[in-house]
């Protein structure tokens, strides 16, 4: 038996940084086609802001092992639509995931391949269980970075395809100073 070494790391709860983790940066230009308001997207693209960063500690893609990652999702909007992560199904679609809110506020959109959708608000201390077969996207509805931890099977993988093509059935927007979860006018099953 080959034993791996256990890991203990301290997440910086102010910045979300996991020391030694692999850092991934997603800028607005990486999210082309994701937001409803194309004009607002092109305008903001001149600055190409960072939308989110991921600090991931990942293992080989083996059954039974676990990965963990923090995400720092910056505040911002494209038109009325709050900044969000791309969102994905798992490549192994039956793999579940746990999210834990560390800082800021936002929420998670979850959706099945049949288009059933749920919105779960999140703040510091919120745990979200993502069941098998649900796509998931996080949204920052506040005005500071929304930071959370995710724990997921090492062999889950990411399947971005259908979300990239079709989006979610709901959009999370700001209207009259309120957070609203509305039907996506461009949604088609
Ligand atoms: C969480 C986890 C990661 C994921 C990241 C960003 O940290 O679910 O697996 O990569 O969020 O989300 P996305 O991959 O959808 O851009
Ligand atoms: Zn996931």
Image: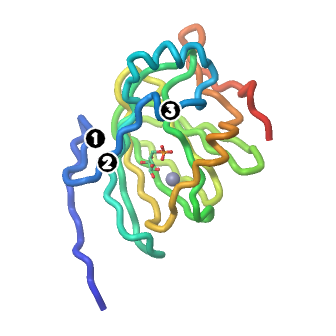
Asked if ligand 1 lies within 8 A of label 2, the reply is no
Q: Earlier in the sequence, mark 1 or mark 3?
A: 1
- Label 1 and label 3: CA atoms lie apart by 17 Å
Which of label 2 and label 1 is nearer to you? 2
Tell me, what colour scheme is on the image?
A: rainbow
Q: Is residue 148 left or right of residue 35?
A: left
At label 2, counting other C-alpha atoms closer than 10 Å, the crowd grade (few under 14, some 14-19, many 20 or more) is many
> Picture coordinates of residue 81 (x, y %)?
56, 21
Mark 2: secondary structure:
strand
Q: Nearer the viewer, residue 116 or 88?
A: 88
Residue tagged 2: 55
Q: Give residue 63's position: percent from left, percent from top.
A: 48, 75
Residue that numbered label 1 is attached to: 16
Q: Quadrant of the C terminus?
A: top right
Q: Is residue 114 above or below residue 177?
A: below
Whether pointer 2 and pointer 1 mark residues with C-beta atoms closer than 8 Å, the reply is yes
As drawn, the label of residue 165 is: none
Please tell me in which quadrant of the rendered image residue 90 appears.
Answer: bottom right
Q: Is residue 149 above or below residue 93?
A: above
Q: Residue furthest top?
A: 176
Q: Quadrant of the N terminus?
A: bottom left
Residue drawn where x is 45% and y is 60% of the image:
152
Of circles 1 and 3, the one toward us is 3
| SS at mark 1 in the image | loop
Q: Where is residue 148 shown, x and y percent of the image?
A: 38, 42
Residue designated by label 3:
84
């Amino acid at each position: 038996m080959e034993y791996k070494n256990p890991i203990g790391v301290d997440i910086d709860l102010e910045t979300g940084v996991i020391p030694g983790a692999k850092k991934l940066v997603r800028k607005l230009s990486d999210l082309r086609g994701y937001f409803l308001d194309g004009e607002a997207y092109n305008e903001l693209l001149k600055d190409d802001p960072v939308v989110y960063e991921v600090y991931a500690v990942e293992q080989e893609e083996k059954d039974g092992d676990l990965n963990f990652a923090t995400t720092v999702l910056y505040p911002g909007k494209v038109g009325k639509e709050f900044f969000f992560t791309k969102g994905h199904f798992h490549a192994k679609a039956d793999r579940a995931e746990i999210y834990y809110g560390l800082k800021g506020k936002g929420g998670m959109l979850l959706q099945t391949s049949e288009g059933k959708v749920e919105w779960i608000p999140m703040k510091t201390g919120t745990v979200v269980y993502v069941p098998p077969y649900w796509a998931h996207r996080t949204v920052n509805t506040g005005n500071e970075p929304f930071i959370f931890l995710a724990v997921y099977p090492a062999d889950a993988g990411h399947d971005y395809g259908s979300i990239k093509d079709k989006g979610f059935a709901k959009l999370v927007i700001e209207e009259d100073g309120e957070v609203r979860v509305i039907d996506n006018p461009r949604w088609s099953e």
